[in-house]
Image: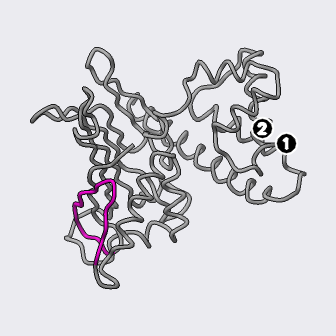
Amino acid sequence: MSISAISIKGYRSVRNTHVNIGQISTFVGANGVGKTNLYKSLALLQAAAAGTVTRAIAAEGGIESVLWAGERKRGDPARLCLKAHFDELFFSEGGVPYTYEIEIGVPQPTEAAFRLEPMIKLEKIVMVRGSRKITMMERKATVVSLRNADGAMETFENAVLSSESALASLTEMPRERISELIAGAGASSLRALFARAQLPRSTHSAFVVAVETYRMMQQQGDIPLGHAFTRRMIQKVLAHHQSADGEGLDQLHRLLHRLEGEAARDAARRFVEESLVAA
């Protein structure tokens, strides 16, 4: 899919800029003026579509290393803001232009395992019809709102993790198809799911355990909801691999322990919020 323009705010040496992009674009400038940061921002937008944007930021050295390095106005949040524009030239066959934007920042003290862990604060998909801008999807923290077929916005609490993009969730395989593949007992079903998930090869054994655990939950009619499901799944995989060793398993264990902690914190925060509402 072609991007007609990008807007960048608060990224490394780029304070705030808007750049039009063609099928072939050439950036000319002296060393150190920010050319590299322009194409790195494009890579981050691509990572947002793939659901790996926070991982990409971590690979760059963490959120602190990618935020605007200059001074900020008092009260301005430390945010990295990226926006992709798709104009009517791309949608010449009856389509409409739209934009996608994402804001990433640092967590509050209770929101992440690490003080400078990147967290997605906001996402939007906006359709443009003439002078009207219609929000089709809006994500704030872990709450996602989507416009349905009737034109009304539907809100989903705790729909995504703070580290995953809602855009990637919207482009996933349909749930009905996933259910069919999980229900299938053949190895080909597992291979199809694993290939679609685009996970590292070292996680294959954990993936198989997770699918088998879900099948067992289905058979027993005991499938927990929300964060309880996430925690149970992670605990089952960890228990299975507790005594295992091999290439990549140490990294897998660390990742699963981290996800378990994040799921536990999200569940605790939701419990407190529900208790306050009830009171």
| Residue at 46% across, 59% down | 118
Give coordinates of residue 148: x percent, y percent. 33, 20
Q: Mark 2 is on which residue type? A: Lys
Q: Would you identify the image quadrant in which residue 94 lies?
A: top left
Magenta stretch in the rendered image? 13-28
Label 1 sits on residue: 240
Q: Quadrant of the C terminus?
A: top left
Is residue 178 shown above or below 161? above
The residue nearer to you, when weighing 235 against 146, is 146
Q: Quadrant of the N terminus?
A: top left
The residue nearer to you, when weighing 165 against 232, is 165
| Residue at 27% across, 20% down | 152
**Residue that sits furthest to the left in the current view:** 131
Q: Mark 1 is on which residue type? A: His
Tag 1's secondary structure?
helix
Give coordinates of residue 97: x percent, y percent. 24, 37
For the residues labelled 1 and 2, say whether their Cβ atoms are less than 8 Å apart: yes
| Residue at 43% across, 37% down | 273
Which disc number belongs to residue 236? Answer: 2
Does 169 sit left or right of 93 as displayed?
right
Q: Residues within 10 Å of mark 2 (few under 14, many from 20)?
A: some
Q: Would you identify the image quadrant in which residue 17 lies?
A: bottom left
Q: Would you identify the image quadrant in which residue 220 lies?
A: top right
The residue nearer to you, when weighing 92 against 8, is 92
| Residue at 77% across, 15% down | 219
Which disc number belongs to residue 226? Answer: none
